[in-house]
Image: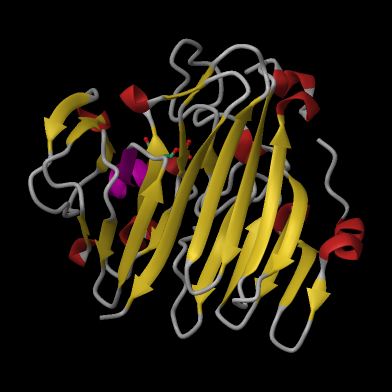
Amino acid sequence: MKTPNINDLNEQFSFITNTNSLIFKLGKGGIPIVEVQNEHASACISLQGAQVLSWIPKNNEEVIWLSEDAKYSVGQSVRGGIPICWPWFGAHTSQPSLPAHGFARKVYWQVLEVKSLVSGETQISFQLVMSGLPEQIYSMWPHDVSVRYTVTIGEILNLELTTTNHSDNEVLITQALHTYFNVEDLMKTTVEGLHGKEYLDKPDDFKRKHQSGAINFNDEVDRIYLDSKDDIKINNTKRTIVIKKQGSKSTVVWNPWEEVANKMGDMGSDGYLSMLCVESANAADDFVTIKKNSDHTLNVTYLISND
Ligand code: TA6
């Protein structure tokens, strides 16, 4: 795929003021990134996959985990950040040879619009149009569909993923914002908000199980919580990350633990102890049906509480 030209992007969208800036640069592996700074936060987003790589709210530490051994190459999702799994989550249900988690995280997204909001936040919108993708990608999922992804960077991070079906037939998707959170000490971290929910346990052959209480981490966890729309809290030693979502019926909680992490080869040394994925998703039974000429929005906000 053609690499977006950073000079053109800067000419069209970049700005620098005393408190706000937005600049496109060539990141690692020659992949364009956009760096944002405002009075509330700073962030970095890769144009490949529109993958948020960093979000640091003012007076806070980095919220997003990025592996020290992440590999940066065209067509490869980076280990960490916020990969967008779309138009399917996990393995493709009927064609297992297709890439896991779809292709949206592996291709360049087009920058549509940039805004400096009166609140002091910065908003940037990206788009993916199926018909504009290379034939080998379009043929994996040949539907007349487009996706818009708007990231609002402030004290709160807001992510909005809208899938629009322009065709005359309904389409089915599964999806996730596969966010890797930085946690100071995984073994002292708990996830609240999923008590009483059913989940599919991937390491145990996707058996259906029942969650009781908060989730603790002392082994591999790879679960799809079904019908879970409530707020989630990641309680860490120093802070709590609060996740609020709309248009998302499932929540995926993942930590590979030592053995799986070592096999992956890009998790960094003991990286699994400082990361946790809590993904706002529509996965497995919770697939989304988008009727002809209509759309679906997955909206997620993250905010930090230091209490
Ligand atoms: O969301 C959890 C999961 O599906 C895990 O099963 C694990 O494999 C992970 O995503 C990472 O997938 P990736 O394709 O990025 O290696």
For the C terminus, which image quadrant?
bottom left
5 lies left or right of 168: right
**Residue 87 pos. (x, y %):** 55, 28
Residue 267 seen: no
Q: Quadrant of residue 302?
A: bottom left
- Residue 286 vs 121, above or below: the answer is above
- Residue 52 vs 177, above or below: the answer is below
Q: Residue at x 82, y 68 (%)?
A: 14
For the N terminus, which image quadrant?
top right
Write the start and end of the magenta stretch as one range.
Answer: 250-261
Q: Residue at x 9, y 51 (%)?
A: 213
Q: Is residue 129 magenta-colored?
A: no
- Residue 206 vs 29, above or below: the answer is above
Q: Residue at x 55, y 15 (%)?
A: 170
Q: Quadrant of ligand 1?
A: top left
171 lies left or right of 188: right
**Residue 73 pos. (x, y %):** 69, 45
